Structure formats: C-alpha cells, structure tokens
Image: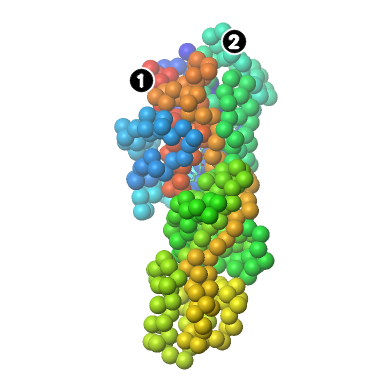
Amino acid sequence: MKVIVIGGGASGLVSAIFAAKGGSEVIILERNNTCGKKILSTGNGKCNYWNSNYNLQNYHSMNKEFLPQIITTKLQDEVKIFFESIGIVPKIKNGYYYPYSNQATSVQTALILEAKLSGVTIENNIYVEDIIKQENKYYIKTNNREYFADKVIIATGSKAAPKTGSDGNGYELVKRLGHSIIKPLPALVQLRGNNNYFKQWAGIKQDVKVSLLENDVFIKKEKGEIILTDYGLSGICIMQLSGAIARGLDSGNKETVIINFVPWIGDTPQEFIKWMDNRSKKVLNRNITELLDGILNYKLVNLLMKQSNIKKETKWLKLNEQFKLTLAQNIIAFRQEIVSTNSFDKAQVCSGGVPLSEIDPRTMESKKSKGLYIIGELLDVDGDCGGYNLGFAWISGILAGKHIAGDN
Ligand SMILES: Cc1cc2nc3c(=O)[nH]c(=O)nc-3n(C[C@H](O)[C@H](O)[C@H](O)COP(=O)(O)OP(=O)(O)OC[C@H]3O[C@@H](n4cnc5c(N)ncnc54)[C@H](O)[C@@H]3O)c2cc1C
C-alpha cells in the first residue's frame, strides 16, 4: 500500500512514522526545504510540546463533543512514551514539557530522524496543488511531478504563521474533496484597540487578572502576565482570550477586556480604596503617585491618574469619594475595548477549519472520501497556550497513522 502525507509539519511527521509501522510505503511531500519548520518557532524556540495537565477544557471547537473520542488518556500516555522512544528527555516547568536541551531543533531533528529510520521517504520542495480521487486511488498533482496513492493524509496546517509554510492552501485542497470549512480566524494572537494612550503604556509588563466581556456580559477570565503595547494588548493571558474575541468580533459583537492591575489587592474598587486608606496611614507624607510607586510601573501610574483626571501631587486622604472610586475602577477594572486582533502572520494558531463532524474521530478518516485522513490544525480544533496545539498535532497524527497501519 502506498501512503502519501501532504505536509511534513508536526502532525504529518508523526502520522508518517506510525503509518510506516504497518509496512506501507510512506512518502511525505513537504513544500519547504525541510520538515517541521514551524516546530522551530514554538515555545520561543524551546518547543513546549506537551502539558502534564491535559484537559479537554483547554480545547476549542464547534464540535467539542467529538474531542473525548480523539484525545483519550491512552493516547496521551502514548505521546509521552513516543517522545521518550525517539530520544526526547522532557524538562517539565509548571506542567509545560520542553526538550531537556531547551531547543526546538531537538524535537524537529528527532522526528525527521525517526521518520527516516522508519523507512519514510521525505520529499522536500514539493508543493501539492491538487488531490483527485480516481476510483480507489488518489492522484496528486504537484509543482514537480505526479503521484498516486492508496491513502492520503492531509496535514497542511492552518493559516497561522504562513511564512512557515501553512498559508491556508490546505483548506482549498479539502474543499475540492467535498469538505466544508468553518471560517478560519486567528487565535493565540495579540489584541488591538483604538486609543491614544497606547504610546504611553507601550512596553509595560504586569501580572494581572483579565476578564472578557461580550456585549457587556462576562464570558471568562484569565490571569498572568500582560504586555501593554503600542497597538493594544499582548501576553499569554491575552492570547488565551483572543480566539473567543476573534470569533465574537467576526459576529459583530462588542468585545471588552477588563484589566485588574492589582489582583493581589482584591477584585472590587472598594477593596482597593480600603487598601489605599490603610497605606496612606502607614506610609506618611506621600501623594497618590508616590503611594502607587512600587506597586505599579510609574508610566502606568501616570496614565491611570490622567485617565482618572487626578493631579499627580494630590494626597489620597484629600481626594473626594467620587475621584477615589474612578481611580480604583481604573486600577482594578480598567476597560479596554478591542477593535480587532493582529493578523494570521502574528497568530500562533487558527480557530476554525474542517469540522470534526466530517471525520471519524477514532481514526481521523474523512467521512466524505474513503482513504483520506485529515489531521492537525487543518481541523477545527485549537488549544490554549501550554503545549496543547502540538499535543493535538501528535495525537491526531498517531490516530491516522495507526489506523493506516492496521493498529486501531
Ligand atoms: C510562533 C508560534 C509558536 C507556537 N508555540 C507553540 C507551543 O509552544 N506549543 C504548542 O503546542 N503549539 C505551539 N504553536 C502551534 C503549533 O506549532 C501548531 O499548532 C502545529 O505546528 C500544527 O501542526 P500541523 O502539523 O497541523 O501544521 P504545521 O506544523 O503548520 O505543518 C504544516 C506543514 O504543511 C506544509 N504544507 C502546507 N501546504 C502544503 C502543500 N500544498 N504541499 C506541501 N506541503 C504543504 C507546510 O510547509 C508545513 O510544513 C506555535 C505556533 C507558532 C506560529
């Protein structure tokens, strides 16, 4: 049996390795001059390839009901065993798995080597232009030559980070084979606003709590480091909200992020007012700016004072109740309207893609075209930061490969 894997990224490489275990001839067609280019950018070059706190709540899809059949505990164990078997020793930080070398190249190299040792042929610089089903075979047209295969695995990724090779062309390939596509939108991406104070806060990093409101209704919250930028907001806690925000904006909803710059003081303006009352009694002869110095970046203090219409040198105990409340609200519940996200270029992943309802969740085989498998980010599944996206690439790749090898 001849198996062709289209796209030698994270999911494609793993699917090829597992498919080859069944004795089939397996060929990866990869448009870049090497496989796994995107793996190199992951985890800031360190490749956060897994997470010990594996939970379906970390995944988003229009058809979440299929996820328990795909992401089983058995497969989660299998991923960890697989990586150890190809020589990757994990370094685990707060549940996040990295290769002990702290280098994403270790993961890329180990996967390519394992593919070669398993007998997989890798053909680089081959761009697949079309896949046509001809009776029981697939005809594959490329920029170079034609191929025929009994089974095809499509692992072309999404539209995120197109410079790495995944530019969304895979959506067109699967559409022509009868699949539909849930509109791809950037996820794990920075958020943009439209305010004149961004230049003032650019570069500030702060540990915060952020809440997302959609049409002024609370949706969810996250905590962690925020990075304030000259276009709006970045940082992991912001990225975690971004998928929901992109979809909300696309549906015409109003999306607001509420930032609590001092979550350790409390969640309500009243708690902040009480804290300042105490502080001004303990730390004497200071104005408000001086009292806030040391707990917030001074540029942020200046900006929040200005937004609250309070003069820098004002003393807290002299401030009237209304101004106290305004400042407290700006510090505990700063409202930032979001107008857009950054584009696919800056996104780590995409939400949307091929609906899970169109594939068999136990094997990744297409329900539209027998012998066709769809895996990885091309599917409508996106995960939170923390190794969940590569995690899905490995799991879906193993499922397809094993099915072809007659192992599940
Ligand atoms: C900056 C950044 C950081 C990230 N960090 C993390 C992280 O730390 N942890 C984590 O879990 N996830 C991370 N991700 C997400 C993760 O990298 C992806 O979810 C994962 O790589 C998706 O795997 P895939 O196999 O579906 O697609 P990809 O890895 O994108 O692979 C698709 C492959 O298909 C090839 N291809 C496309 N079209 C064709 C064609 N027509 N013909 C031939 N070849 C084709 C592409 O060149 C590419 O090699 C990060 C992503 C980015 C951009």
Q: Does the Cβ of the disc 1 residue fall within 8 Å of ligand 1?
A: no
Residue furthest to the top in view is: 135
Q: Up-down: is 280 above or below 378?
A: below
Q: From this viewpoint, is residue 146 visible?
A: yes
The residue at 45%/52% (across/down) is 220
Q: Return the x and y of residue 227 as percentages of the image width and height.
A: 54, 61
Residue wearing tag 1:
407
Q: Quadrant of the C terminus?
A: top left
- Observer-nearest of 188 and 57: 57
The local crowd at label 1, few if under 14, some if 14 to 19, many if 20 or more residues have their Cα within 10 Å, is: few
Residue furthest to the bottom in view is: 285
Separation of marks 1 and 2 at Cα, in angstroms: 26 Å
Q: From this viewpoint, is residue 34 visible?
A: no
- Observer-nearest of 356 and 248: 248
The residue at 53%/70% (across/down) is 330
Residue wearing tag 2:
134
The residue at 41%/17% (across/down) is 23
- Which amino acid does the dot numbered 2 rest on? Gln
- Observer-nearest of 296 and 20: 296
Q: Up-down: is 197 above or below 104?
A: below
Give the image quarter of residue 57. Answer: top left
Q: Return the x and y of residue 355 as percentages of the image width and height.
A: 51, 29
The residue at 53%/51% (across/down) is 214
Name the side, left or right, on which 161 lies relative to 218.
right
Q: Earlier in the sequence, mark 1 or mark 2?
A: 2
- Which amino acid does the dot numbered 1 rest on? Asp
Q: Return the x and y of residue 125 as percentages of the image width and height.
A: 63, 30
Instruction: Check disc 2 and report its element: helix, strand or loop.
Output: strand
